[in-house]
Amino acid sequence: MADTVDISWHVELSITQLNIQMKLGNAKAIKAGDGGESPPFEYYGFKWRMAYLCSTSNDGRHEDLEVFLISQNPQGVAADVDLTSKTREMPLVQAENEVAHPFTPICKKCIPIYDLSKSPKEFLLADELVFEVNLKNIKDASSEEQRGKAYDLSAVKLEVIDGRSIMTWLNRGKAFGLGPSTREHDSDLCGCSFARYWATNFQDRRYWLCKRLPVGTLSVERCLNGTDPLERVGEISEEDGQGSKWITVFEEKKPSSKAFDPTDDDAVVVFCKVWEQNCKDLSYLGHVLVQKSTLCQELLNKLSAETARFPDDTRFNAYLETGDGTIEDITSFQTTVDECGVGSGSIIILIRRKRNQPAPALSDIQVKLRQIHGLPQIEPEARKSGGATDSSTKRGGGGTACMEEARNDSGQRKNQGSSNRKAIPRSQSAFAGTHNNMSEPTN
């Protein structure tokens, strides 16, 4: 079995100070790209995380170990800080009234690895690295104190898409998309804030970075809770051409008794709506997380049973929104999610029908949905060909045109997966897989 770093934490609280100790056992196993972080520690209403990250030096000649204490607070914080390497009894940071901007480190030290080891090139196997940080006189930092730090303090506008906002959109008499085509301002973030520590500030929520597409659809890019630990909000923002920076996120919530579904580079977020044909409005049911390799029928069964909670014997049709108020019937697709054109951010509409009722014509459903949305009807020729001339930039999920359909002599539908779909970009976090294995702090 490969060597792994044994990471543990110890925290002591007193009336006057907070003391956090981080131990890294089997230090020889540390390599460039490794990292770990503590659970959050709360002290007088302020939250903190201690973390480490191993990286290659700028000149590429040796490895560095970065140790930092993150202020996981939405406001600026000031405190007296003392960071020490207990292994070598070496002071690393000693500062009075040190200032941290929202969701940034209050102290950070980059140490060449040879300064911490007995060997000039590597740790000895039995080596244990111990770092300790003490905080005193913790308080909110004033605006003047925060301006004294040389960071990007520009505001980044935040747009949050969640179940409530999607329902509000549908209740406006809309059938397509997840919201209006223009961004809606929720709040502001600081450009210098670390995106990971903003996203992980709430235990019952998870945030997905999204790319805005036309007609109110999204491409869900990646989960910010597991992103690169040093990635800043300003680095992932987009300019709107009017002097403002924005990020759009999808907010995923969970009950306190449940855990979030695990996610990786192949995860696909699929949104689901339902329409009862005698109703004037559509309803938002929620979302599911599946793999690109999941079969389309498995996805539809999951939506039916877990999201819509249809009875087992329910007959239904499933329609994939393809942009500009057009849809595609994917009810009988037998390929994988990726091959049938469902990307991360795609929207599927479920419509129930009676057991002895034939499937409705695609054109009829599209006409009715466009009427609900207040869109003009598509000319017959355009409707026959699927409507949108370029759905690759309009459909949710950021996918390309997904399927070429043909009918064989028996009238059965065949489908072929597009070969030019792009993988969803996703940052590789140095902390992936480490947080869940960390020891709980002892008081």
Image (tube, grey):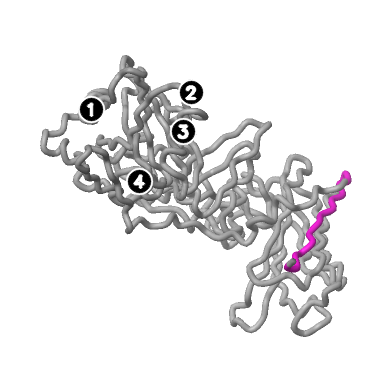
- Give the residue displayed 55% in from the left and 60% down from the top: 428
Q: Residues within 10 Å of mark 1 (few under 14, many from 20)?
A: few
Judged from the image, the secondary structure of the residue bearing numbered disc 3 is helix
* Residue placed under numbered mark 2 in the picture: 312
In the rendered view, would you say 169 is above or below 427?
above
User: Percent position (x, y) of residue 376?
Assistant: 17, 29
Q: Amino acid at mark 2?
A: Asp
Q: Residues within 10 Å of mark 3 (few under 14, many from 20)?
A: some
Q: Is residue 393 visible?
A: no
Q: Which residues are magenta?
A: 2-16
The local secondary structure at tag 2 comes to loop
Q: Residue 388 — which label? A: none
In front of the other: 16 or 222: 222
Q: Earlier in the sequence, mark 3 or mark 4?
A: 3
For mark 4, what is the residue? 340
Residue 301: mark in rendering: 3
Query: Is residue 58 shown left or right of residue 381?
Result: right
Q: Look at mark 1 in the image and give the residue it sits on.
A: 361
CB under 8 Å between discs 4 and 1: no
Lower position in the chain sequence, tag 3 or tag 1: 3
